[in-house]
Structure formats: structure tokens, C-alpha cells
Image (cartoon, rainbow, N blue to C red):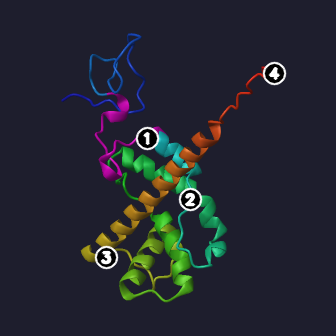
């Protein structure tokens, strides 16, 4: 049985030139493409870009006027949870096209402050709270599992949040590129 190389293993000595998207190891897929992981829209996921995004991506929340009341402890914890989610995705234990549990919980927080949640979303919110907060959740509201229907709704919410987060990342990148391109005005020399 052959041992599979991990993404973080050091590369073998390589020739200087190779085709884009191919490893210098005689046409084998490169480290970023070994897993065959794809995110939303079946686009290959760049783990390095996802790690950077875990630190700098915006927080997507439900717009209700309660955004300023998000618990500071959870906001500070978000980059670490995103990095942990990325590690789990690299190991195949989580999906690239979904946001982490804490992001989904923080998205729902302003919504539940603005109006009462329905029964299904209350179960999902308590499940997320149990997964994020762990032992801090009282036993009377603890929710350790969801049925398949609720889990599918949670998965859809996480995918939607991830899609909006990636869209915000692309928009920010486009804005930076537009700022970088500054038209140069040429002064035509006066002839007369």
C-alpha cells in the first residue's frame, strides 16, 4: 500500500520549468490539486487563498440593526474557527463550499434578536450554539443532533453564507485592481 503525500510535505527536487497546473514531478497533479476538492460552482479550491480568507474575509450577518451587539468573544474567535474549518476541509472532514458553524451562528444572532425564529430555525440555532459553545450551553436547551431535514436547511444556509463571503472577497479584489489602474493623462505639447 503506497503512502499518499500530504499537501504540506516538502516537494521533491524539481526541474525549473513545468506546465501551469501540473506538478514538476512528471505531469502529476500538484499539491493544491491532489485532493480534487472543489468549492461552490465546481471551482478548484486554493487552500492558501482560503487560509488568507479565513483571516481577512468579512463577517456576513443578517441585516436587522442588531449587528453591533454581536458578542465580542465570538467575533475574536471567528478567524481561528475558520482556520480550523479549513484544516478539516483539507483532511476531508468538512466541505469547502460551506461556512463554519460559528459563521452560521453569528449570521443568525441578529435575526433572532430582531424577531422570533420558527421551530425549525430554533432547533438549528440551538444546535449551532451547542456545537460552538460546548459545555457552556445549559442542558435544558442543549441540542446535540438534528434530523436530516434540519441538517439540509443548515447546510443550505452555510453554503449561502460561503457564497456571499466569496462574492465579497471577489468584489474587494476587483475594487483593489480598479484602484491600482490609474489612467495617466498625457499632456500634448503645445505647438503654437
Mark toward the start of the polypeptide (2 vs 4): 2
Mark 3 or mark 1: whose residue is earlier in sequence? 1
Name the residue beneath numbered marker 3. Answer: 150
- Tell me the magenta residue range: 30-48
Q: Residue drawn 51% across and 56% down?
A: 81
Dot 4 or dot 3: first in sequence order is 3
Q: x and y percent of residue 109 in the render?
A: 54, 76
Q: Is 52 located above or below residue 126 in the figure?
A: above
Quadrant holding the N terminus: top left
Of residue 78 and residue 173, the one placed in the foreground of this image is: 173
Q: Quadrant of residue 177?
A: top right
User: How many angstroms separate mark 4 from mark 3 (CA)?
Assistant: 78 Å
Disc 4 to disc 3: CB gap under 8 Å: no
Report, in whole angstroms, how far the alpha carbon at label 3 lies from the one at label 1: 29 Å
Cα–Cα span, label 4 and label 1: 60 Å
From this viewpoint, is residue 55 visible? yes
Residue 138 among magenta residues: no
Q: Which residue is mark 1?
A: 47
Question: Quick check: can you spot residue 99?
Answer: no
C-alpha separation, residue under disc 2 versus residue under disc 3: 24 Å
Q: Which residue is mark 4?
A: 192
Q: For this view, does 71 lie left or right of residue 157? A: right
Between the residue at mark 2 and the residue at mark 4, the CA separation in whole angstroms equals 65 Å
Amino acid at each position: 500500500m503506497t503512502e499518499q503525500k500530504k499537501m504540506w510535505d516538502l516537494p521533491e527536487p524539481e526541474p525549473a520549468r513545468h506546465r501551469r497546473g501540473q506538478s514538476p514531478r512528471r505531469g502529476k497533479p500538484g499539491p493544491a490539486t491532489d485532493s480534487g476538492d472543489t468549492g461552490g460552482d465546481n471551482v478548484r479550491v486554493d487552500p492558501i487563498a482560503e487560509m488568507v480568507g479565513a483571516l481577512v474575509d468579512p463577517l456576513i450577518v443578517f441585516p436587522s440593526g442588531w449587528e453591533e451587539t454581536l458578542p465580542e468573544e465570538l467575533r475574536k474567535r471567528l478567524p481561528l474557527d475558520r482556520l480550523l474549518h479549513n484544516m478539516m476541509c483539507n483532511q476531508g472532514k468538512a466541505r469547502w463550499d460551506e461556512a463554519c458553524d460559528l459563521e452560521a451562528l453569528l449570521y443568525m444572532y441578529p435575526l433572532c434578536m430582531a424577531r422570533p425564529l420558527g421551530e425549525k430555525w430554533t432547533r438549528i440555532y440551538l444546535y449551532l450554539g451547542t456545537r460552538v459553545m460546548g459545555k457552556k450551553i445549559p442542558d435544558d436547551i442543549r441540542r446535540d443532533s438534528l434530523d436530516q431535514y434540519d441538517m439540509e436547511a443548515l447546510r443550505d444556509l452555510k453554503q449561502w453564507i460561503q457564497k456571499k463571503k466569496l462574492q465579497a472577497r471577489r468584489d474587494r479584489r476587483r475594487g483593489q485592481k480598479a484602484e491600482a489602474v490609474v489612467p495617466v493623462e498625457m499632456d500634448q505639447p503645445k505647438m503654437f
